Amino acid sequence: MHSAEQKSSRTVIFISKGTPNDDEFVLWLAPRLEAAGYQVFADILCLEAGDRWRKVLTGTLQNRAAKMLLCCNDVTLNKDGVQEEIGIASDLVRELADPNFIIPLRLEPYKKVFGIGELQWVDFSDRWAEGLNRLLETLEKQQAPCDPERPTISQHWEQYRKRASIEVKNEPETLTSNWLRIVEGPSFVRYFKASGVVSRDALRNAVKTFGYPAEVYNQGFFTFANCLDVVEHFGGTGRFTLAFETGVMEFVQEGLIDDYGLYRREASNFVMSMLRLAWNNKCKALGLLEYKWSKASGFHATKDVAPVGKKFSWGRQGDKRSSMLRNIAKGHVWQYGISAQPAFWPYPHLKLKARVLFAEETNGEAGPAIDDKKRQHRLRRRVCKGWRNKQWYGRQMALLELMSGESAFISLDVASDASFTLDATPIPFTMPVTTALPSILGDEDEETDESTIYASRPEMEEVE
């Protein structure tokens, strides 16, 4: 693409800034540039939830930016992300043959930085209004793309300002994480090795059909199971002997480098994989529906576990709450679920991730899950955006209490005589500060958003 064609496809004024030190200035500047007819990009607002922020920033700067406004003070210019953007912009100066592509905005005196040291800045250090006038003159003189007849000012700038101005109180607040602490586990991890020649495929098949978690390694496998469990299941595949057993946390932290060339990271991965398998086995045994997402399996409530529209009580202490795990919205059945990712730092735990799976609605019940990732994503955006944090938390708690039953723990069997025991309630933590926002939600308020409770009514179909 020629330089002239490249410039014609570039319509954005890109603001390179530091977070949070430049936020106030950018919130003031951006809507004023838009009022003058410019299209503005700044990460403070233009990145949506779920965006890969660095990829979006880089792509916008490389492919859409007509000018880069660089906020200049020592703190900002020392940030790695800003320096990376300066490097990209310096390449664009040559590519676009535009020596004025980078326009420094002097917010306060700063030390010269390689790549912009000789550029003439626009001074905002004294009065922002005077700096704005000079900047508008500069942009007009350099013929930056502008449409003053049809200015578009995003309402989100002011909304963000209001959110950022929420009062923070110097009072601690107890919050709930999405971590389940592992309170107890098996004492040993064992490695069983084939005494003779065993087909690799046969070994894998035997491990796959084993009732307890196991992981193939060389001519054997890791497991938490005991010798009797192994002999009973693997006897038809070959003869396996116990090559070693070691403490689980010792294995995770040190590996087995000398005898087996197994480094700590690989050893930890084996244990995490078996713990994940134990979680999956537990979910399947409870009748939850497995759906394979891009990086992990999610386990979702089904009609046998949670009828459409039914509220499930949760909360073992204090006031009881209730939450739905399946309902109809936008002509589809949504089914709440979770994935679990094991971790050992800073202490052994499972990290939960909320999932929502959509299926076509047929006669008030779910058909097969929609197998189109884009449709799943669009439905999550339409239906779940109305759910508040306490609703997400309530659904998680309801599902965890279904898994734990009357117990305060969830047990994951890994052998006939061993299991991992998890707290059924996520770990709480204390924040040193809190906000002035209200945090009161009554039981009857749990399912008041129209996208979940009333969406099946024709007059509500268009409610977002």
Image (cartoon, grey):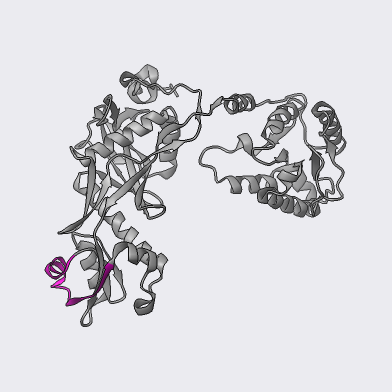
Q: Is residue 201 left or right of residue 265?
A: left
Image: 103 above or below 3? above
Say if the magenta span includes residue 156.
no
Residue at horizontal 56%, vertical 25%? 166
| Residues shaded magenta | 226-246
Residue at horizontal 68%, vertical 37%? 21
Q: Is residue 80 left or right of residue 193?
A: right
Residue at horizontal 13%, vertical 73%? 236
Q: Is residue 337 visible?
A: yes
Q: Quadrant of residue 173?
A: top left
Residue 421: percent from the left, percent from the top?
24, 50
Image: 442 above or below 224? above
Front residue (pair 27, 258) = 258
Residue at horizontal 37%, vertical 22%? 441
Q: Quadrant of residue 314?
A: top left
Front residue (pair 390, 86) = 390
Front residue (pair 458, 170) = 170
Q: Is residue 9 visible?
A: no
Query: As drawn, which residue projects farthest toward the bottom?
Result: 196
Say if the magenta span includes residue 229.
yes
Image: 302 above or below 223? above
Residue 420: percent from the left, percent from the top?
25, 53
Front residue (pair 426, 452) = 426
